[in-house]
Amino acid sequence: MIHALYHAPTETLGLIKTCLDKRGMDIAEHHLYEGCRVPPFTHEIEALIVMGGPMNVNETYLYSFLDTEVELIKQATLAGRPVLGICLGAQLIAKALGSRVYPNSVREVGWHPIELLSVARKDRLLSEAPQTFDVLHWHGDTFDLPAGAVHLAKSHNCVHQAFRWGPLAWGLQFHLEVTPEMAEAWVQGEESVSYIRGAGEEPGAIVEKAPVIFSTLQPIAEQIFSLFLDIV
C-alpha cells in the first residue's frame, strides 16, 4: 500500500491522484495537520508520498509530528522503499538524510521555469521530460543536498529544485501536482495574498496563468508520476 502524508487541507495529491485512479491503485492518507498520527514503518508501507505544507521542517515546537515523520521517512528511504517528496516533502527527505534546511535567498512563488541538469537524462523519472518547463513554486526554504544525492534540477532563484537519493527516493521542491483549481484555492485568504505579494507576485496572475501552463504541464507531470507509480 502507498501511504501519503498531508500537512495542509489544500495541499492534496492533485495530479498524483489522477494517475492513481487511472491505475486503480489505493492509497492510505494521513492528515497529520488534523491530528492523525504518523504511521509506524512496517512492511505494509510499500511506498511513501510526502506532500507540501506551510510549516518549516524544524518547527517541531508547533508541529509535534515532524520528528516522528522525519524518522519514518528515514526508515522508508534507507529500507529502499520508493519515496517521493513535494516541496516541504522534499525538505523533509533532505532532513531525514542528514541535510540542513534553511531560508532560501528569496521567497520563490508563482509560475516560473525549472531547468533539468544533464544527469537528469539518465534519471528514472525525469529522463523524458523537457529540459526546461514552467512549474508552480511556493516556498521560502531550501536545503543542502543529502550526501550521495544526485542533483537533478535548478531554477533561477533556487539551485536545489530536485534530487534523487539512491535509486528510489526523489525530492521535488516545485509543485508538479497542482491543478488550476488547486492554484485558485491556494491564493485565497489574507495570509496567502500577503505571502504571494511578499515574493513580488500577484494572486490574480497565478490564477490567470494556471490553465494555460497546465495544458502543457499536465502530460509532463502525469508521465513523471506514472513512472514513480510503476516502481511500486
Image: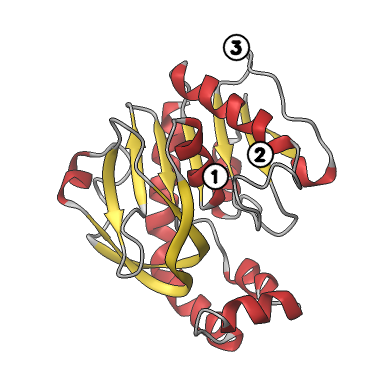
Which residue does the numbered mark 2 point to in the structure image? 5
Q: Earlier in the sequence, mark 1 or mark 2?
A: 2
Cβ–Cβ below 8 Å for labels 1 and 2? Answer: yes
Q: Nearer the viewer, residue 202 or 59?
A: 59
- Characterize the local packing of mark 3: few (<14), some (14-19) or many (20 or more) Cα atoms within 10 angstroms: few
Percent coordinates x, y for residue 28 in the rendering: 70, 32
Percent coordinates x, y for residue 189 in the rendering: 76, 77
Q: Quadrant of residue 116?
A: bottom left
Q: Amino acid at mark 1?
A: Gly
Q: Nearer the viewer, residue 154 or 198?
A: 198
Tell me: 22 left or right of 33. Answer: left
Q: CA distance from mark 1 to mark 2?
A: 9 Å
Regarding mark 2 in the picture, which secondary structure is present there? strand
Residue located 45% across and 39% down the image: 94
Nearer the viewer's eye, disc 1 or disc 2? 1
Tell me: 125 left or right of 93. Answer: left
Regarding mark 1 in the picture, which secondary structure is present there? helix
Which residue does the numbered mark 1 point to in the structure image? 89
Cβ–Cβ below 8 Å for labels 3 and 2? Answer: no
- Characterize the local packing of mark 1: few (<14), some (14-19) or many (20 or more) Cα atoms within 10 angstroms: many
Residue located 54% across and 40% down the image: 92
Q: Earlier in the sequence, mark 3 or mark 2?
A: 2
Q: Amino acid at mark 2?
A: Leu
Residue located 67% across and 47% down the image: 59
Q: CA distance from mark 3 to mark 2?
A: 17 Å
Quadrant including the N terminus: top right
The extreme right residue here reads: 35
Cβ–Cβ below 8 Å for labels 1 and 3? Answer: no
Residue 43, disc: 3
Q: Amino acid at mark 3?
A: His
Examine the rendered structure and indicate whether residue 185 appears above or below residue 171: below
- Characterize the local packing of mark 2: few (<14), some (14-19) or many (20 or more) Cα atoms within 10 angstroms: many
